[in-house]
Image: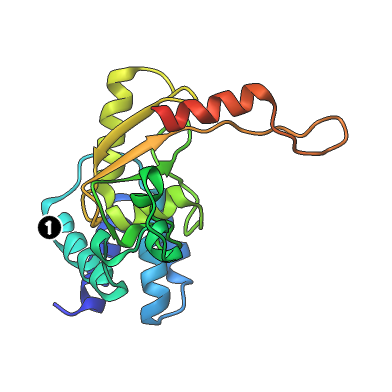
Amino acid sequence: MTRDERIRFLIEILLEEMPRFRPEAARTPDTPEARRQLLRGLMNVRPPMPIRADFLMAQDRLLKAETEERGIVTLDALSTVAEQKGEVAEGLSSRLVLWQGDITRLAVDAIVNAANSALLGCFVPGHRCIDNVIHSAAGLQLREACAVLMRAQGHDEPTGRAKITPGFNLPARYVLHTVGPIIAPDSRGQYAPTEKDAARLAACYRS
């Protein structure tokens, strides 16, 4: 099965599960790039529910191949702050790494997801928030794993706490999901974090 055949196969299964999206899918331009975006969008809007084994097999092969194409980043390929500065430093700076890039490429123990209180990922098709990006790269298993946690909990995830799930198709072994504070505008329409907001954010890091 070629990459495009796999994408078409996955789209068809999702449209069988969610036939209301067939008219929209029919209007999608018939190019490989458009079909890949359609697949991501359908995966984004799919609610947590049992997943077909043949879907998972095809999805996992696709996502792992795409991750390999983007390039996996390992810790030993990164230099610490001390190494970057050319200094012999002690303490945190000798272990701290500053790196800017695609978090879904990191082969580490865990990455952190800025989750919403439902903890089910972003349902906006193709949205560029980190929640959507991580769920899109990890696969449908991630939403299902989060749903299991939330059903057991029985209520929304409070700000400042954290849950852990496997990383599934990500190079990272685990994903830590934490809900940060939502900064509301003041009477002048300015966004100024309060001490309470800062304390909640600190709680996210501690959790």
- Is residue 196 placed above or below 58 in the rendered structure? above
Q: Is residue 24 above or below residue 43?
A: below
Residue 38 in picture, x, y percent from top left? 40, 66
Nearer the observer, 188 or 123 = 188
Image point (41%, 68%), residue name: 37
Q: To which quarter of the image does residue 105 belong?
A: bottom left
Residue designated by label 1: 54
Does the image show residue 39? yes
What residue is drawn where x is 47% and y is 22%?
A: 158
Q: Nearer the viewer, residue 93 or 30?
A: 93
Left or right of 15, for residue 206? right
Please report the residue visible at 33 percent of the width from the left and 49 percent of the height from the top. Answer: 95
Name the residue at 27% across, 53% down.
139
User: Where, by quadrant of the figure, is residue 182 drawn?
Assistant: top right
User: Residue 206: where, in percent of width, then height?
Assistant: 41, 28
Viewer-proximal residue among 37 and 26:
37
Q: Mark 1 is on which residue type?
A: Asp
